[in-house]
């Protein structure tokens, strides 16, 4: 009975429709993070400096880790915690995925626009497939994967052709790119480590560990945060919630599927981010609808190419 249930779960987690819906949900949540973080800078930070920015990120991810463990412990009717032999794996993911990635992302986003930041962060998909194939050797870099990446990356370029320049300022645009590279590496690490530990457990505890380190760094260098308004608290709780849900679901998908088949959907994150930034942020300007439609077509084509499988004849 248990074997049958496990088999059915594995089939569900590898079903193309399930992968598509869950991956798009994760990307929509991540896309919404950019404008909410930008609004959070104005509401939560008395002074927009690097220590306060790091403190903001640290509180968000510590709360995200706690939410992850509470939600999934209740759902599974048992307290989730990592095995002793996996503590170093949790620490490594916490360093790469939370500390390194989000210090670069939060500082970078403070020095670039919401639209440009979310577009540049979408390049993590390209890096993830390269890292998985050429560095960690978890899968082969096939012609199909290369073509899918080209379509997806072309979509990111098209959506940026709206009057914004690609001039790279180091502490803004380059920092966002560095965070995208870190996210790519962390995706591959979660894929590898999920053989030994539940990806939900990895996500939850690496958030707590990484967030605690960032809080300590932020406070040590004089960071401050204003939690006196309901709007500020609401933004912080939403950002923590989306991280808890998105990263846990993403980790489950990575455990049961090739890295490239999951991370290709990350190319849709800029679409969600650009749309929400255009609505929520006055800085983002107008993105021509033709650019968004062209990007959607290119990204969808890349996803279809990667997920297409020939029907075997009997």
Image (tube, rainbow, N blue to C red):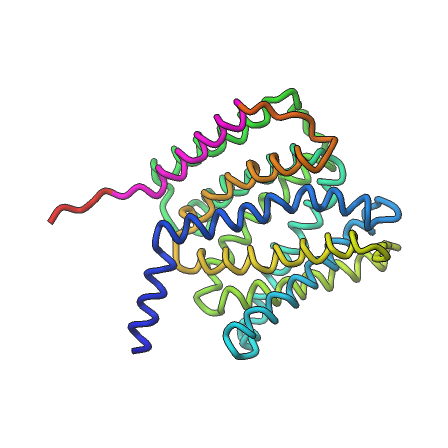
* Position in image of residue 253 (x %, y %): 44, 56
Of all residues shown, which one is farthest toward the left?
314
**Image-based side of 298 in relation to 54, left or right:** left
What segment is highlighted magenta in the picture? 290-309
Q: Residue at x 20, y 44 (%)?
A: 311
Of all residues shown, which one is farthest toward the top?
163
Q: Residue at x 53, y 65 (%)?
A: 200
Q: Which secondary structure class fits the magenta region best?
A: helix
The answer to whether residue 276 is above or below residue 158 is below
* Position in image of residue 204 (x %, y %): 60, 65
Residue 148, quarter of the rendered image: top left
The answer to whether residue 164 is above or below residue 269 is above
**Image-based side of 272 in relation to 150, left or right:** right
**Image-based side of 288 in relation to 24, left or right:** right
Q: Residue at x 61, y 56 (%)?
A: 243
**Count of numbered marks:** 0
Residue 89, quarter of the rendered image: bottom right
Quadrant of image for the N terminus: bottom left
* Position in image of residue 246 (x %, y %): 55, 55
Residue 271, quarter of the rendered image: top right
**Image-based side of 273 in relation to 45, left or right:** left
Please say whether residue 237 is one of the residues in the magenta stretch. Answer: no
The answer to whether residue 207 is above or below residue 141 is below
The answer to whether residue 312 is above or below residue 8 is above
């Amino acid at each position: 009975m248990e074997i049958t249930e496990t088999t059915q779960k594995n089939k569900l987690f590898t079903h193309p429709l399930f992968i598509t819906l869950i991956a798009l949900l994760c990307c929509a949540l991540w896309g919404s993070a950019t404008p909410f973080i930008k609004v959070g800078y104005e509401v939560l930070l008395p002074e927009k400096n690097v220590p306060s920015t790091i403190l903001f990120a640290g509180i968000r991810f510590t709360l995200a880790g706690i939410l992850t463990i509470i939600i999934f412990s209740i759902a599974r009717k048992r307290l989730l915690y990592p095995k002793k032999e996996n503590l170093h794996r949790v620490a490594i993911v916490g360093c790469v995925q939370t500390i390194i990635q989000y210090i670069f992302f939060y500082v970078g986003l403070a020095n670039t626009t919401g639209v440009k930041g979310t577009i540049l962060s979408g390049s993590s998909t390209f890096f993830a497939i390269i890292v998985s194939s050429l560095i960690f050797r978890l899968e082969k870099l096939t012609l199909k994967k290369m073509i899918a990446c080209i379509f997806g990356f072309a979509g990111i370029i098209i959506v940026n052709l709206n009057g914004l320049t690609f001039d790279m300022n180091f502490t803004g645009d380059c920092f966002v790119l560095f965070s995208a590279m870190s996210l790519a590496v962390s995706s591959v690490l979660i894929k590898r480590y999920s053989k030994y530990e539940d990806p939900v457990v990895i996500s939850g505890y690496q958030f707590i560990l990484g967030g605690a380190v960032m809080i300590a760094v932020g406070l040590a260098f004089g960071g401050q945060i204003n939690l006196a308004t309901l709007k500020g608290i609401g933004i912080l709780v939403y950002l923590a919630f989306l991280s808890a849900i998105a990263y846990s679901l993403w980790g489950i998908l990575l455990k049961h599927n090739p890295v490239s088949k999951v991370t290709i959907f990350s190319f849709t994150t800029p679409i969600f981010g650009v749309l929400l930034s255009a609505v929520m942020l006055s800085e983002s300007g107008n993105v021509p609808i033709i650019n968004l439609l062209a990007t959607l077509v290119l990204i969808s084509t890349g996803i279809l190419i990667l997920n297409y499988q020939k029907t075997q004849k009997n």
